[in-house]
Image (spheres, rainbow, N blue to C red):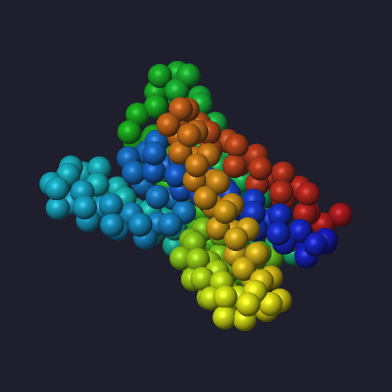
Amino acid sequence: MEIKHNIGFVTLLLALIAGYCDTVTFVAADSIFSAHVTGNFIVFAYQFVKGSDIHAWVKLLTFPVFILAVIAGGRIAGKVLNHYTILFWEGFLLLLAGIIVAVLNYNGLFDDVMMYTVVMITVFAMGLQNAFGKLYAKETHGPTTMMTGNVTQASLDFGTLIKNGFKDADALISLKKQLVTILGFLVGCFLGAFAGKQLGLVTLVFPGLAMIICYLYHREK
C-alpha cells in the first residue's frame, strides 16, 4: 500500500471531516458534538442548570456510543489487513445517516427521535475515526478529531522557531504538519456550519462519500 506517501492528504481529509461532522450535528441537531463528545458534558451541564427537559439527557448517550465505536474499531483492526477498512465503515455510517435523513424528510417522518438516532450514528462514525487515529498513529500527522493537542504542539514549535530565529528545520516541519490538521479542521467547521444551517443533517452524505473514496483509493491492490 502507498499510504505513507499520502499522510498529508489523509490528515487533511480526516481533520476536515471531523470538523464538518462536529459542527453539522451541533448546528442541526440540538447542539450535540459528534467528534469531540466530551464537549457534550459542558452543554449538558449548562442545559441542566437552566432546567432543560429530557432532551438534555440525550447528550450523555454520546459517551457510551463513542466507547462502543472505539471498541468496534479495535475489533475491526484485529481482523483486517487494510488499515483503511475502519474508515470505510465510518464513511458507510455517515452516508447511511445522510440517506436516512433524506428518505425520512421526503416522507415527512423525520422527528426528534430519528434526529437523535442519526446523531448517534454520526457519533459512532467519529468514534471509529478516533480509533483509527490511536491504532494507526503513523497514518496521520496527529489527532484529527480534537485540536487541543495539535494547537499545543504548534505553539511549542512556533516558540522554538522564534527562539532559534526560524532556523530550526525540525520545528518548522512539525509546525507545518500541525497547521495542516488545524486548518483542515477549521475549514471543516465552516463548511459544516454552512451546510448544517442551510440543509441540515442530510449533508452527512458528503463526508461519507469522501471517506469511502479515501478507502477505495488506499485499499490493497
Q: Is residue 146 left or right of residue 61?
A: right
Give me the residue at 33% from left, 54% from top. Answer: 40
Residue 91 rendering spot, x and y as whole percentages:
61, 46
Quadrant (top left, top right, bottom left, bottom right) of the N terminus: bottom right
Residue 167 rendering spot, x and y as whole percentages:
69, 77
Q: Does the rendering let one see residue 133?
A: no
Give me the residue at 28% from left, 57% from top. Answer: 42
Quadrant (top left, top right, bottom left, bottom right) of the C terminus: bottom right
Q: Is residue 209 left or right of residue 54?
A: right
Q: Is residue 30 left or right of residue 168?
A: left
* Quadrant of the image occupied by residue 115: top left
217 and 199: which one is in front?
Answer: 199
64 and 18: which one is in front?
Answer: 18
Q: Residue furthest top?
A: 107
Give me the residue at 62% from left, 68% from top. Answer: 175
Q: Does the rendering let one see residue 13?
A: yes
Give me the residue at 71% from left, 54% from top. Answer: 9
| 155, above or below 217, in the image | below
Residue 120 rendering spot, x and y as whole percentages:
42, 47
